Amino acid sequence: MKFNCTVQINLPINKVIELFDDVDNLDKWQDGFVSFEHLSGTPGTPGAKSKMVYKIGKRDMELIETIVVKNLPTEFTGIYEAKTMTNTMKNYFTSINGNQTKYDVEIEYTKFNGLMIKMMVFLMPGLFKKQTQKWLNQFKEFAEEL
């Protein structure tokens, strides 16, 4: 499963990247974000691994992030592995003019483990895109309110 989402942010690209690249901001725009823990590699560089924890309903979901590409201000790509799924998320940033930035995301789910998640993908494939777009919209709101 593969999809794209986008949002236009009314800020210069350097400010957008500053906010995006700070893990201390994740709880300000990602619902359910609990914690971020560096595991290995040089933090913030390709090859680095970190554990991200989210609260989804009553359960905790752990993701292992592996940075694949960090070529900011244009691209940040990571692989995210959970017990039930694996995906690659490519984040692209484009300066529209001096005061606006286009933030595009391309997500490709490459593995689903377990009957429940496979049923969710089959019955509600739009749910994944909807959640991603929600986070992009929340990032825009967070960034523009500062």
Image (tube, rainbow, N blue to C red):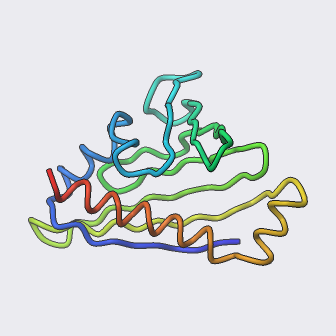
Residue 93 appears left or right of 1: left
Q: Residue at x 38, y 36 (%)?
A: 23
Task: State the image coordinates of residue 50 (x, y, percent, origin top left).
Answer: 56, 30
Task: State the image coordinates of residue 93 (x, y, percent, origin top left).
Answer: 32, 61
Residue 10 appears left or right of 112: left
In the picture as drawn, the residue positioned furthest to the left comes out as 98
In front here: 74 or 30? 30
Q: Residue at x 18, y 59 (%)?
A: 144
In the picture as drawn, the residue positioned furthest to the front comes out as 58
Residue 86 appears left or right of 138: right
- Number of residue marks: 0
Compared with 59, 99 (above or below) is below
Task: State the image coordinates of residue 115 (x, y, percent, origin top left).
Answer: 90, 60
In front here: 128 or 22? 128
Q: Residue at x 44, y 66 (%)?
A: 134
Q: Residue at x 26, y 45 (%)?
A: 19
Within the image, what quadrant is residue 55 found in?
top right
Q: Quadrant of the N terminus?
A: bottom right
Task: State the image coordinates of residue 30 (x, y, percent, origin top left).
Answer: 44, 50
Compared with 39, 124 (above or below) is below
In front here: 118 or 90? 118
